[in-house]
Image (tube, rainbow, N blue to C red):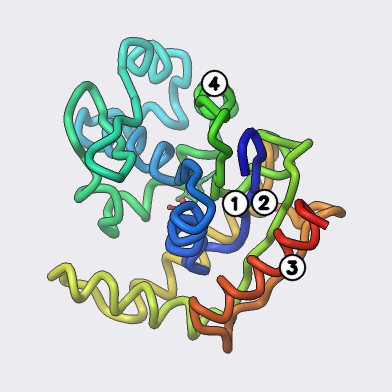
Amino acid sequence: MLGRIIAIDGHASTGKSSLAKSLSYEFNCIHINSGSMYRAIALHIINNNLIKYIESDTNYLMSKLDGISLEFKEVGTKLKLFLNGKDIEKDLNSLVVSNEVSNIAAIPEIRSKLVKLQREIDRSKGIIMDGRDIGSVVFPDADLKLFLTASIEVRAERRYDELIKKGANVTLSDVINNIEDRDKKDSNRKTSPLIIDNDAILIDNTNKTISEQLQLIKEIVQSRFYN
Ligand code: C5P
């Protein structure tokens, strides 16, 4: 994997990050969850009462984001995201953040700020990055592009179980509404919409376990990189 890039894009809650994380252990490379960067910006905007400026004054909003620091730091064997020096990972997947993040991710200035950071990450060990525009915009020359999808029922149940395990107070219909809303916004925004790139391999994991997906991707990597 040295120096190589695998882009994993796809619909909301298709397990991109869990898959990318397992693959990064397998291939001994870095995993970056780009969604966590958009979520961190959303969290900052929510916590600082800046939501009202998303539509009314993007320039002011961007000026408020100018000084923030967003960095991945190695903690043990993991890369964790820090916002202004603080570990914010546990707050990123709440429904409050999920309900705002796609509006924030549609702002072109925010996208270019984050795409720049994503491209600056050291890729010498190899990178697996997951998100919505990784194969189409961030790394159009990626060595392998995958696009994950699954039925809405299966995606919602997986995300609901995850949130309930973390003690969140949500209903299955809250989760379905959020997933459908994000897919719609992510696919229809003007800047870098979610698309299936021509050279991406489409994987529908509705009926696939994580180990079946891992096996499939290991075979694809083997034949693409090493044959
Ligand atoms: O990957 P995750 O579901 O955590 O991403 C949260 C949201 O961040 C997405 O619904 C999308 O609005 C935005 N996102 C994006 N581009 C990326 C990654 C995430 O627009 N590369």
Q: Amino acid at mark 2?
A: Leu
- Name the kind of residue labelled 3 in the image: Leu
Residue 145 locus on image (x, y percent): 72, 52
Callout 1: helix, strand or loop?
Answer: helix
Of tags 2 and 4, the one toward the viewer is: 4
Element under disc 3: strand
Instruction: Give coordinates of residue 58: x percent, y percent.
Output: 47, 21
Q: CA distance from mark 3 to mark 4?
A: 27 Å
Residue 200 image position (x, y, % from top left): 78, 57
Q: Does the closest atom of ligand 1 sit within 8 Å of the Cβ of label 1?
A: yes
Pointer 4: what residue?
Answer: 120
Which image quarter is the C terminus in? bottom right
Dividing the picture into quadrants, the one containing residue 99 is bottom left
Q: Residue at x 47, y 14 (%)?
A: 59
Q: Residue at x 34, y 26 (%)?
A: 71
Q: Is residue 196 above or below residue 133?
A: below
Can you name the residue that lies furthest to the right here?
198
Furthest residue to the left?
Answer: 167
At label 4, which amino acid type do we have?
Answer: Glu
| Residue at the spot of label 3 | 202
Amino acid type shown at disc 1: Asp
Asked if the residues shown at circle 2 and circle 1 are in contact, with their CB atoms under 8 angstroms apart, the answer is: yes
Q: Residues within 10 Å of mark 2 (few under 14, many from 20)?
A: many
Which residue of the protein is positioned furthest toward the front in this rendering?
A: 227
Q: Which numbered circle lies on residue 186?
A: 1
**Which element type, helix, strand or loop, lies under badge 2?**
loop
